Every structure is written in structure tokens, then in C-alpha cells.
Amino acid sequence: MTHLNVPVHYRVLSERGAGGKAVAVFPETQGNLQARAAAAGTPLSVFVQAASGAGVALRVFTPDREKGSSDSAAVAALTHLQGDLLDVAEVHMGGESLPAQLCGGEWLLRQGVPDVAEQRADLSPIGLGAGQVWVAGLGRPTLVAEVADLAALDAFMPDAQAISNVNRATGTTGLILFSRGGAGRADLSLRAFGPLRGFLEDAASSNMLACTVGVLGASGRLPRDTNLLRAAQRMPGQPARLSVQFAEVAGGTEGNGGTEVWVGGAAMPLA
């Protein structure tokens, strides 16, 4: 017998079992979904409206509101339903449809081809000085800057007002800081900030990781011998590990060439 108020809990995109995001997966959509999400004890709850071999329909909630879409929630739901799905599926949530694929036991969702442009900017208000940066976006422009090394990335202290001012000055809405390499054989390490989007720092952002990979592709720094990367997102106290698949795409008639990016990772059930 299924108990409506007892979801299956997952830890998604975690770093060796720590950090990441906790998600409650409900296999059906009966009752008051908002109340059930509020009682789940997790930042995200995902309800499965429908599932077939080729696709799933999901509704995602925080304890306070319906969120619309969340890649972390989708990864949890896909993992929960994996035995009933093909290795390629379509995810419907929040009015969006996203292709997903199973890769090495992990579900990845297509983020798209980020638009990337180089520019120079003064980052001294946030303590990083002036230099080359990039504006990358998948619907929302994000400022992307490389720091010297992992120590500099970890030492960065975000100031919401200073980041907001830099975003306004550059016509962007978010900030990504990254460095190459990282602990645990990571190919790429990053932190993601978005006070203009309603959060100071995100623990695991598929969108912002995809923007970073787009910058590496635009600057010719993606590896030639593989199409896979491991990324460590290093929000203090809440580390995350994400997987990336990428491919170079031609410009075509619309001039939208660049790097197509898929992002996802592992979801582990919690006792």
C-alpha cells in the first residue's frame, strides 16, 4: 500500500555523499501538493504526474511555492523511475520540455548552446580587479570570470550588493567564478552567485555550469580526447559534483554555433 505522505528521499549531485541537494520524490499527484511538499522536510519536492518509457511529466515544489522546473528534482525523479524508462527520455515540467539521457548510470539534461561573448570589466568592487571576462547565457546573461586557482575560488567572500552592482554595470544577472581542475579529479571547479535572481549563492546550478562550459568551448579550452567533464561546485558547506557532456555544433543558418551542453549527475536514495 502506498502512503501518500511518505515520499522517497534522494540526495542529488552530492560530493561523496555530502552537500548537493535533498529532493523528495512523490510517485503520484494526489491531495494537496503544496502541503505535502511543506511537510516533506526537503528544499525540493517533485511529484510524478505521468511516466512512460519515453518521458515523464513532473511538478516541482519548494516548501512555500510551486517552483516550475528544477534539474536537480528531475534527476531525482528520473533516477527513481529509471527501471521504467528508456535511456533517452523527455522531461516535461514547468511548461518546459527537456531531453534527458542516461550516461554512465547518471541522468543528464540538455541545457542547450550558450551564447558567449568576451568583454573587459572592472571586478574590483567584488575584490577581483579588472580583466577579461565573458558574458554567457542560456536565456539570462551571466558574467563569467576565471580566478587564479582553487584557493582563490574558495577564499572568495561574496557581497550581495557588490555583486549586484557589477551585474548591473555589465548588463548581467548572475556571476560565475571558476578555476580549472579541483579536488577529487574534478576537471573544473566553480561557484555561482545570483543576488539579482533571488539567491546569494547556488549549491548546484546546471544552467550556470553550462554557461561555464560554453566559455571554455568558445575559448578553445575543452579537451579534444573526450566529451565528458566532471565539475565540482564549491559553495562552502554544501559541495556538489556534476557531470557534463558536450559537443561542438556548427553555426547553421541562425548563427547559433558553439558548444551544446548536457548537465546532470548522480542521485542517491536516503534511508
Image (spheres, rainbow, N blue to C red):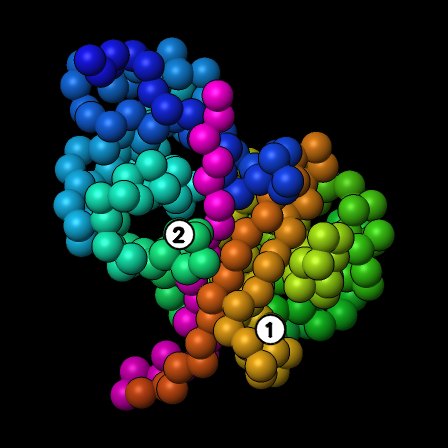
In the image, residue 235 lies at what x, y percent?
Answer: 67, 40
Q: Residue at x 38, y 86 (%)?
A: 250
- Residue 264 against residue 160 in the figure, above or below: below
In the image, residue 255 lies at what x, y percent?
Answer: 36, 84
Q: Which mark is residue 216?
A: 1
* Amino acid type, residue under disc 1 in the picture: Leu
Q: Quadrant of the N terminus?
A: top left
In the image, residue 203 lies at what x, y percent?
Answer: 58, 40
Cα distance between the residues tagged 2 and 1? 23 Å
> Is residue 159 highlighted in magenta?
no
> Is residue 259 highlighted in magenta?
yes
Residue 43 can be seen in this image: no
Q: Which residues are magenta?
A: 253-271
Q: Residue at x 40, y 82 (%)?
A: 249
**Residue toward you, 240 or 164:** 240
Q: Residue at x 18, y 53 (%)?
A: 54
Residue 150 can be seen in this image: yes
Left or right, 30 with respect to 226, comes to left
* Amino acid type, residue under disc 2 in the picture: Trp
Label 2 vs 1, first from the N-terminus: 2
Could you say whether the residue bearing mark 1 is in a helix, strand or loop? Answer: helix
Q: Which mark is residue 56?
A: none
Q: Which mark is residue 107?
A: 2
